[in-house]
Image (cartoon, grey):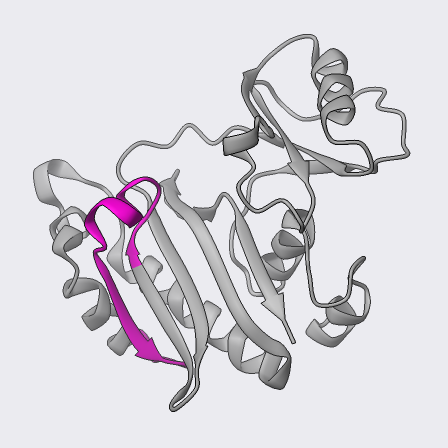
Amino acid sequence: MNINNWIDGLNISGKPDEWEMKELFRLYNIFTPKGELIKYDDQFKDTNLQNPLVVKVCDPEILHKTDIGGVKLNISDNIEFVVSEMKSMFPGSNILIEEMVPYSGIEFIIGALVDPDFGSALMVGAGGILTELYKDVKFRLAPISKAEAIRMLKELTVADILQGYRGSQMNITSLAELIVSVGDLVNDLGQNFSQLDMNPVVFYEGNWVALDGMAILK
């Protein structure tokens, strides 16, 4: 699959869901949790995924899943019941099951948008609940070099956590490489691109992992 095949294969033109976003991320060697998609009209039977699991509604029209009960965490049994319950809550929507990523440390957000004057711009900052609390973000035009991405990260208030503060194992170089990949992705989308958010991005077993993502295409 290439990016043009991905665009053509979207279930809703211009509005990829979380599963489709993660397919796109994997095209650019961005790590995502191992998961399975259950179509809204499919009967769930069993899964080969390892407990504990996350069960999510997977619908591009639902952006704030957690706020409306669309995310169930730490599921280790009664998976079929949880999936059935989620389907009842969100009829007509697909359901995503993923292995939980037991990360530690702070979360990051990586995003991109189109500036009317300068073109596509990348954003990185403290993610999760810290995004709105601290507004600790930096911007650069896309695409971006690894050296510039590292400079971008070092400008953040939370930069120390990426440079070994109190024994942190987070890797600033590989996070910079992820930002470069997002810049390449945005550049490849070209005129199709409007907006992208990858939040949260967490560090687990030596890799940065995108736990969620959304995009709007023209």
Question: Would you identify the image quadrant in which residue 93 lies?
Answer: top right
Judge from the rendering whether residue 165 lies leftward or rightward of residue 148; answer left or right.
left
Residue 208 in view in this figure: no
- Image vertical order of residue 10 relative to residue 209, above or below: below
Q: Is residue 59 magenta?
A: no
The quarter in which the N terminus is drawn is bottom right
Q: Position of residue 97 (x, y in %)?
A: 67, 31
- At 31% from the left edge and 31% from the top edge, which residue is drawn? 104
Q: Position of residue 76 (x, y in %)?
A: 60, 12
Q: Quadrant of the C terminus?
A: bottom right
Apparent side of residue 45 relative to residue 76 in the rendered image (left or right) = right
Query: Can you see residue 46?
Result: yes
Residue 107 screen position, x and y as percent: 32, 43
Q: Which residues are magenta?
A: 125-146
Estimate the x, y position of residue 138 in percent, counting from the top left.
25, 67
Q: Nearer the viewer, residue 84 or 1?
A: 84
Q: Residue at x 78, y 22 (%)?
A: 88
